[in-house]
Amino acid sequence: MIIMIAAAAENNALGKNNELVWHLPNDFKRFKSLTTGHHIIMGRKTFESFPKPLPDRVHVVISRQENYKPEGCIVVDSIEKAIAICPENDDSYVIGGGEIYNLALPFTDIIELTKVHHSFEADAFFPKINKSEWTLVESEENYKDEKHLYDYTYETYIRK
């Protein structure tokens, strides 16, 4: 299964200047729980936004730079090649950024979306979910608290 996992604002904002514009510790824990032990597919800029590779995951990085070879990563030049590397009998996660989400959408079986209930200025955006192609099968509301500045909802969509 190809699973897209993201946190996006009400205006589909993902981030600005290659950084998230919010901090939701529980969402980070959920991301870690879901992706650990699996292949994660991302663009070069997303990979470079990490201080180091994420532990216990196979990093598949999409880049058009011919000599781009970060240690511990598989580098390919297309979403099709990234998906082909992933095991067919396991979940693989597309983790961003905005351009990669758009490229991966036609291949995606499930979307795990954290909807942040606020709008932000951004330069990267999550694709609009076409409700005629996707069914919302799970929704879990979470409310702001001392560690979370915004209300947010975990949403799971499956392709119709």
Image (tube, rainbow, N blue to C red):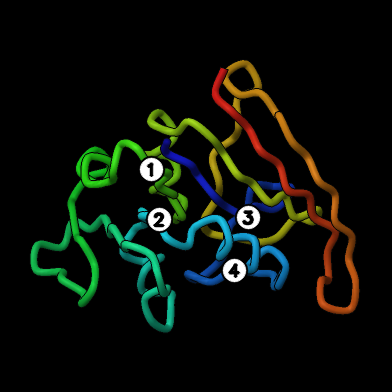
* Most distant residue in the left direction: 67
Q: Which residue is mark 2?
A: 38
Tell me the mark number nearer the camera, choosing from 3 and 1.
1
**If you read the primary sequence from the N terminus, does the residue marked by circle 1 or circle 2 appear first?**
2
Q: Residue 101: which quarter of the image?
A: top left
Relative to 87, is 22 on the left or the right? right
Q: Percent x, y for residue 67? A: 9, 68
> SS class of the residue under badge 3?
strand
Tell me the mark number nearer the camera, choosing from 2 and 4.
2
Tell me the mark number nearer the camera, choosing from 2 and 3.
2
Q: Give the residue displayed 21% in from the left and 74% down from the top.
A: 70
Q: Amino acid at mark 3?
A: Ala
Relative to 117, is 7 on the left or the right? left
Q: Amino acid at mark 4?
A: Leu
Distance of label 1 from label 2 (alpha carbons) = 7 Å
Q: Which residue is mark 3?
A: 7
Distance of label 4 from label 1 (alpha carbons) = 28 Å
Distance of label 2 from label 4 (alpha carbons) = 23 Å
Q: Looking at the image, do the residues carrying marks 1 and 2 touch, with CB atoms under 8 Å apart?
A: yes
